[in-house]
Amino acid sequence: MSVKRYASTTIRGKQKVCRYMRGDSRVRSLVPHTMSFSKEHLFSMMERHPVLYIKPDIGSLGIGIFRLKRGKGGGYRLKEIVGKTQKSRRFTQLSDVYQAIVSARRSRLIIQQGIPLSKVGGRAYDIRAMVQRKPDGPWVCTGFMVKIAGSGKIVTNYYQGGKIVSLGSLHEQLGLTEEAGASRKAKLTSAALDIARCLSKRRSGMSELGIDFAFDSGGKLWVLEVNSNHPQFHPLRSIDPGAYQKMKSFAASYGRFNAK
């Protein structure tokens, strides 16, 4: 008996995903300012935003990400993720920052506006929404997991020392009322489904997306990244078994039997 193959197409490249979302009026306001990496774009973006993230256009696990921040007394602080290590350097000139990034990069990069993420316990967090569908069925938001950054880290990834908790646990730690938590969850669900509909119009055959959202310090919702290639949800196995089993069941329906 033949094994059913993974039946979910992907969209490769963060910049392409951002461009598709920017073209949809329902989700446009969620997308941070994003440009391809070049010296001209680095200078123009730094004029507009105090913090920038420079990321591989195609990448994972937080590897190869830079955070560039304008210093209060002048100059620039550049932090970089190398493997599981975070390095930090200071520069006086932005042109030197550009050269340092060019020397270190291993693939095509994008530049993205840095979002001042909401924090819990003094650490930044973002929220992964899993959106899936059975073949020929509608999109369904099957659950959430929250990634809380490790101490001093510029990314929230589990691989980089981040902590995974359930959405309910996050709301408890933030001291939200049941009503406020439900409102937040509904907002996340609505945005996730809008993004799934937007992107699946651009690429047929999509069956699952892992969408990383964040609230900024003022409460505005942003989309940080959309993962369409085998988005991971295995950390939920121990913290939210019900959501985990639902995601695994949906994944199996389009041939992803090896989902953890």
Image: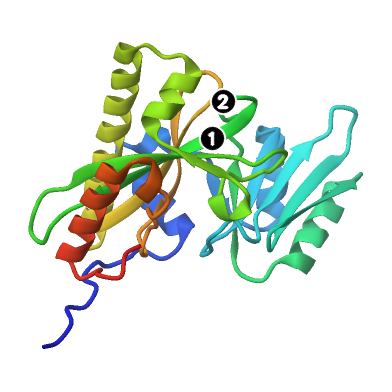
For residue 120, the mark is 2
Outermost residue to the left? 136
Left of 69 or right of it: where is 173? Answer: left
- The residue lying at 42 percent from left, 51 percent from top is 235
Residue 136, image x, y percentages: 7, 59
In the displayed structure, would residue 104 be above or below residue 232?
below
* Image quadrant in which you'd find residue 172: top left
For mark 1, give the secondary structure: strand
- Residue 16, position as x, y percentages in the image: 42, 58
Give the residue drawn at x 13%, y 57%: 134
Depth order, front residue of 154/234: 234
Dot label at residue 46: none
Mark 2–mark 1 distance (CA, rounded to whole Å): 7 Å
Disc on res. 125: 1
Examine the image and state in which quarter residue 260 appears: bottom left
Q: Name the amino acid, label 1.
A: Tyr
Left or right placement of residue 257 versus residue 51 in this view = left
Number of marks: 2
Q: Are marks 2 and 1 in contact (CB under 8 Å)?
A: yes
Residue 171, horizontal then vertical, whole percent: 42, 22
Q: Residue at x 23, y 61 (%)?
A: 251
